Structure formats: C-alpha cells, structure tokens
C-alpha cells in the first residue's frame, strides 16, 4: 500500500516497479547514474519516491520509447529550461505520428502478404490485375525499412519454402474457401452461423500457410478486407458484396473464439481456487 506524506503519495521501489512496469534493478540503476533519484532514502536503506519522481520516470520512459540514450535523457530532464507540459505535448504528437505510421505499415505488410499469397485462386488471372511485380517489391521494401524485416521475411520464407505445386494447391484452397463463403452469402446464410464458422475455421488454417495469426490479427484482417482498396477489389471479383460479408463473418467468428478462450481461462481459475 502506498504511504501518504502531506497529501503526496509515496512509493517504495517495488511499488514503483509494479506501477511503471520496469524492474527494481532498472530503478536501482537509474538511481546509480543520477537519472532518477528517490525523494528520500530511509534509515533502513529503502528508497521512496514521490509524485515528482513518478512524473520524471514517465518522461524517461517516453524518451526511451522514441530511442534516446539514457545520458541524453538525463541532460534533457536536468536542463533548467525543461518544460514538462511542452514535453508531454511533444510526446503526444510523436506517439500519434507513430500510431499512424504503424497502421500504415500493418496495411503494407498485409498487402504484401495478400500479393504474395493472398488466398485467391491463381487460375483466375483477373485476380492479379491490381498488382504488379514492381508494387510487390515496393511493398516489401517499405515494410522491411520501416517496420523491420523479420515480420515480413517470416511470411516470405514460409511461402518460398513451398514447391510450385504446393503453392498452387494453397492458392486453389483459398479460392475454394472464398467461393464457398460466396455460396453461403447468396443463399442467405447469416454471419455467425455454424455453417459460416466452419468455413472460416478452414480460412483460419489457410492463413497459417503464411504466418501464425493471433485473434487480433484475424479481426484486423476482417476489417482490412472491407476497408483496404486492394482487398476490396480482389474480393469483389468473387462477389460485389463479399468484402462486407467477410468482415461481419470474421468479426463474429473471432468473437466466438474469444468467448471460448475466456470461458477456458475462467474454468482454469476456478479449478485453481478449488484446489487451494
């Protein structure tokens, strides 16, 4: 429990560690180099931190996030002209720019995957009219330079590890899945139905040919299928209404998986309590 001193909250090093998500050893190191000194040290040697130290630690973590070295951060924070409010405004601007860039990069990566492997039927050449070899190379360059190579390279490595015959099988499998979803949509089978979810389970496994998707990634793909121009153009060649149907169906499929996962976690937690 935090102590109160004259209306100010006082934190032990362990409490501050838990609050900020940094290790106790890191806080000790920040003290040693003069980056973050405790407000006081007890006779027992315990460090105690107040509100000013919390705000300073927040600044340290912000500056670390944007890549500054510890010595640079110390010089900034120790500058008599340092303006905390202006720094927070600056951090907010940088983070918003970073969020926008990351969102763009996610779309770039997914477009790269779509172009390389996209789950469309290779026998229908029209499905590739929207992509060129130069576009593919540009997508890969952007993703590697701005996001880091490993995420893109993993999908490319998987794809390149397949034989030409296996690639054709995978593409044909994707085409069959989307054609089956079109059949269900035209027949009036609603998103979230057992029939649709069975097909989406196949789609889920199909995506694993390229990378292992989290539930958040699956949900994001559903959104991209109905918002990204490249995906929309591709899926509308199966049926004009398929992008919207895909998004709704995938959203409900992921919701069902998340519900099952939550129920499993609750059951495990209950079982642990009963064992005690």
Image (cartoon, rainbow, N blue to C red):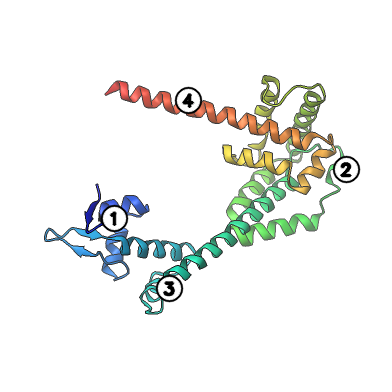
Residue 171 in view: no
User: Number of marks in the image?
Assistant: 4
- Camera-nearest label, 2 or 4: 4
Q: Is residue 29 above or below residue 164?
A: below
Seen in the image, is 39 located left or right of residue 64?
A: left
Which residue is denoted by mark 4 in the rendering?
263
- Camera-nearest label, 1 or 4: 4
- Is there a contact, CB below 8 Å, between mark 2 and mark 3? no
* Real-space CA distance between mark 1 and mark 2, rounded to the nearest whole angstrom: 59 Å
Tag 4 or tag 1, which sits nearer the N-term?
Answer: 1
- Camera-nearest label, 3 or 1: 3
**Residue 154 image position (x, y, % from top left):** 61, 48
Tag 2 or tag 1, which sits nearer the N-term?
Answer: 1
**Residue 262 image position (x, y, % from top left):** 48, 29
Residue at disc 3, secondary structure: loop
Seen in the image, is 110 located left or right of residue 1?
A: right
- Is there a contact, CB below 8 Å, between mark 3 and mark 4? no
* Real-space CA distance between mark 1 and mark 4, rounded to the nearest whole angstrom: 34 Å
Which residue is denoted by mark 1 in the rendering?
24
> Seen from this angle, which residue lies furthest front?
7
Label 1, residues with CA under 10 Å away: few <14, some 14-19, many ≥20: some
In-front residue for pair 8/211: 8
What residue lies at 27% left-to-right and 61% top-to-bottom?
28
* Real-space CA distance between mark 2 and mark 3, rounded to the nearest whole angstrom: 58 Å
For the C terminus, the image quarter is: top left
Residue at disc 2, secondary structure: helix
In-front residue for pair 54/4: 4
Label ID, residue 126: 2
């Amino acid at each position: 429990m935090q102590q109160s001193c004259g209306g100010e909250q006082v934190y032990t090093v362990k409490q501050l560690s838990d609050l900020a998500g940094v290790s106790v050893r890191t806080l000790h190191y920040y003290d040693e180099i003069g980056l973050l000194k405790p407000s006081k040290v007890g006779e027992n040697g315990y460090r105690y931190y107040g509100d000013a130290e919390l705000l300073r630690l927040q600044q340290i973590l912000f500056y670390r996030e944007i890549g500054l070295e510890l010595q640079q951060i110390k010089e900034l924070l120790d500058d008599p002209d340092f303006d905390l409010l202006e720094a927070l405004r600056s951090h907010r601007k940088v983070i918003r720019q970073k969020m926008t860039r990351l969102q763009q990069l996610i779309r770039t990566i997914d477009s790269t995957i779509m172009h390389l492997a996209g789950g469309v039927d290779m026998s229908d050449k029209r499905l590739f009219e929207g992509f060129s070899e130069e576009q593919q190379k540009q997508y890969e360059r952007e993703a590697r330079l701005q996001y880091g190579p490993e995420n893109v390279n993993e999908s490319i490595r998987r794809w390149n590890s397949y034989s030409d015959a296996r690639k054709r099988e995978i593409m044909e499998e994707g085409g069959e899945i989307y054609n089956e979803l079109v059949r269900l949509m035209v027949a009036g089978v609603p998103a979230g139905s057992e029939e649709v979810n069975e097909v989406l389970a196949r789609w889920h496994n199909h995506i694993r040919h390229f990378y292992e998707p989290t539930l958040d990634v699956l949900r994001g793909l559903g959104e991209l299928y109905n918002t990204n121009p490249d995906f929309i153009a591709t899926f509308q060649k199966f049926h004009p209404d398929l992008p919207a149907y895909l998004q709704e169906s995938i959203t409900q499929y992921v919701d069902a998986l998340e519900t099952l996962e939550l129920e499993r976690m609750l059951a495990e937690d209950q079982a642990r309590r009963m064992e005690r």
